[in-house]
Image (tube, rainbow, N blue to C red):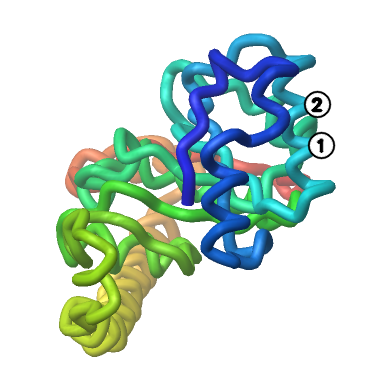
Amino acid sequence: SVNIDAAIINEKTFNYGLTGKMVEECSIPVGNVVLEIIESKAGNDAALSAFVAKSREHGFLIALDDVGTGHSNLDRIPSLKPDIIKIDRSLITDINRKFHNMEVTRSLISLAERTGSLPLAEGIETVEEALTLMSLGIDVFQGYFFSKPAPAAMAINTDMAPVKYLASRFKTHVLEKLNRQKIMENSYKRMAAKLRDALMNGTTGTLDSALSAFITENTNIECAYILDTNG
């Protein structure tokens, strides 16, 4: 993987310089090399599109970095058609405790899948973040939870312990989530039964007051909608 500062892309960078030289000297298959375009620094859109098109002709894979930050432009996803969309760590940090981050990430994952890109979550530092992302459908992870940056010689002997631990925890995580959903569903059913009994025991003139009293007594009800037969 090679980071590309999109702000310096122009016609002079199309020969790939050191990157192209290293790929050739090391006999690395071009399809194994990912060019990561730093999305927050993208400047000239025309030059960027031309660079991506030329890179594809050579066989490089394209990743769009920093997606989800304040600088990112989602319109570059359909125009550049990246192979990989890297969801920025600003959305990933504490995602297990931040509802809005979770929903935005869910939307980005769906967008990536529908446009033929692979969603990647970066900046994962805790098992809770990783488990939440697995539940959302992320298949590729990057972050200190798995490993910190290391020399190539050390990276060959990758420590698989975090991956094995995550796999063992995920099954438990899913079962716990299903159990919580079942408990919540049963709670809703009991509440609905109580409300039905309260309304059936009242008269036509007291239905509004019975409903109001029921909502007041059950503080976990945030709002209620009264529908007619047409919904």
Q: Amino acid at mark 2?
A: Ala
Residue at 58% in and 65% down:
28
Category of crowding for the residue at label 1, using alpha-carbon neighbours closer than 10 angstroms: few (below 14), some (14–19), many (at least 20): some
Q: Considering only vertical position in the picture, is 160 above or below 63?
A: below
| Residue 99 visible in image | yes
Separation (CA) of disc 2 from disc 1: 5 Å
Above or below: residue 26 compared with residue 39: below
| Image quarter (top left, top right, bottom left or bottom right) of the C terminus | top right
Q: Is residue 193 above or below residue 105?
A: below
Location of residue 16 in the rendering, given as x and y in whole percent from the top left corner: 63, 36
Q: Quadrant of residue 119?
A: bottom right
User: Which numbered tag is attached to residue 177?
Assistant: none
Residue linked to disc 2: 50
Q: Position of residue 169 (x, y in %)?
A: 21, 83
x and y, in percent, of residue 174 in the image:
33, 80
106 left or right, relative to 178: right
Q: Which residue is mark 1?
A: 53
Residue at the limit of the structure toward the front, as seen here: 25
Q: Is residue 127 left or right of residue 170?
A: left
- Asked whether disc 2 touches disc 1, contact meaning CB atoms under 8 Å apart, the reply is yes
Say what amino acid the circle numbered 1 marks. Answer: Ala
